[in-house]
Image (tube, rainbow, N blue to C red):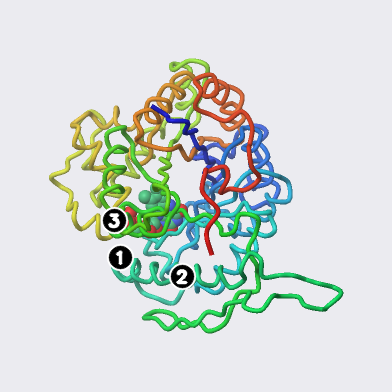
Amino acid sequence: MTNGRRLHLGLNAPPLGSSPYGWRRAGIDPLSSATGEFYARIAVEAERGLFDALFLNDQPTLHPGWETSPAPLRLDPIVALATAAQHTRWIGLVPTISTTWNHPYNLARSIASLDRASHGRAGWNVVTSYNPKIAANFGLSRLPSKQDRYARAAEFIDVVADLWRTWAPDAIIADKQTGVFTRPGGVRLVEHHGAYFTVHGGATVPPSEQGLPVLFQAGGSPEGIALAARYADAAFVSTPTLESALEYRARAAAAATARATDRPRLLVLSGAALTLASTDEEALRHRIELEGSDTDAVGVGHIAARLGIPIAALDLDSPIPLDLVDVEARRRDDSEGFVNSIVHVARTGRPLREILRTGVGHLAVIGSPEKVADIFEEWFRADAVDGFNLHFDVVEEGLPAFVDEVVPLLRKRGIYRHAYDGGTLRSHLGLPTPQW
Ligand SMILES: Cc1cc2nc3c(=O)[nH]c(=O)nc-3n(C[C@H](O)[C@H](O)[C@H](O)COP(=O)(O)O)c2cc1C
């Protein structure tokens, strides 16, 4: 049953696609992800498909591989989305920014500015970072522990939320006759003394049309789910199967005791990596063409790194050897959300080659528009998810195909919007205007 719910869609970028060869295709600008025009183009295209949001994943570190790939290139997400905002009218704009490497004052100011500049379309995807390489960019030799990162994240969000409430929505009178700009009591200063931050003062940015930016969270450990349950409007999750998506929903529901009773249920958006073509066979051929002989090598390398085992321990025709994996250590040292999703599919005992076709982090669909629509509808009607955050192997090829061919099918099935019915990200997601 959908009970009047509508499927939500996000576009997840950069880089310019998950295929390592995408940049070499005709018509693709190899420098895309380091240009403002790219973010504007994909935002316009996603808006043509009436997507809820353009969502930028991010890590403040230079990924290796720059000798053969532009994948390490990316702009600061706020700047990229501010550029996209100027070329669009409706679509939401959600940067990923870590609470581990920033200060709440700067972050509150940047996101609120994006929210004002886009007339109420900003969100913030809260992460705590798992990549140890980032630490060196900030003068540290290692990441703080996960517990420490999540404790800092909770206090960070509290401070940001207070700063965003500095100006009451009706604070500004701006009466030119009397010279009164702000009504008495309309501005509330922040007095915060905590374990991680001390902030005395207030924000310079008043609320936008949506009141407060929308909070997303990504991270599937118990600490991550607890953070989402307490603070977030929506969670971005890595659930490669319907069963794992249902399991996440149950875990989020169990953690919801920490959620204010007047808040709607946490929205869940599952990552989905799509390779589209007119038939399933053609889609598989297309995938092989895009990744060449590396189709499986890329996935094998990813699994080996996440599980902390040598590539040589993996065989395409055998199940993943979980007995070699210290699962608890990997959960502690990596993103538990991603580790859990690999362990989940590994436990099915299916051969690795088969697993690589259906997803080892996010749900992966290699197939026709009907196949994608079938899976999306099944997951949505089972109430496993509220929507999907989409990756494409070459975003500027896959996204237009999705908008032209999958979106009409989702509409026909009665689960996707025909028009935006509000101008803010909050309204796209069906979230209420926050109380002050
Ligand atoms: C679906 C998903 C997407 C994520 N996206 C990012 C990202 O873009 N940047 C980042 O630094 N961390 C990202 N993370 C991980 C977060 O940094 C997370 O706070 C941290 O690794 C702890 O993860 P855990 O709660 O899953 O153990 C993501 C995690 C998940 C599950």
Q: Quadrant of residue 167?
A: bottom right
Amino acid type shown at disc 2: Trp
> Which residue bears the numbered disc 3?
257
- Residue 189 drawn above or below residue 99: below
Q: Residue at x 52, y 21 (%)?
A: 277
Q: Are marks 3 and 1 in contact (CB under 8 Å)?
A: no
**Frontmost residue, 223 versus 18:** 223
Amino acid type shown at disc 1: Lys
**Residue 408 shows in this picture:** yes
Label 1: element kind: helix
Left or right of residue 218: residue 322:
left
- Residue 407 drawn above or below residue 233: above
The numbered dot on residue 159 is none
Q: Position of residue 371 (x, y in %)?
A: 43, 20
Q: How many marks?
A: 3
Please tell me in which quarter of the rendered image ligand 1 is found: bottom left
Compute the Cα span from label 3 to label 2: 29 Å
Label 2: element kind: loop
> Which residue bears the numbered disc 1?
146
Q: Position of residue 20 (x, y in %)?
A: 49, 40
Q: Which mark is first along the chain, 2 or 1?
A: 2
**Frontmost residue, 163 versus 240:** 163
> Which residue bears the numbered disc 2?
101
Q: Which mark is first along the chain, 2 or 3?
A: 2
- Residue 192 drawn above or below residue 74: below
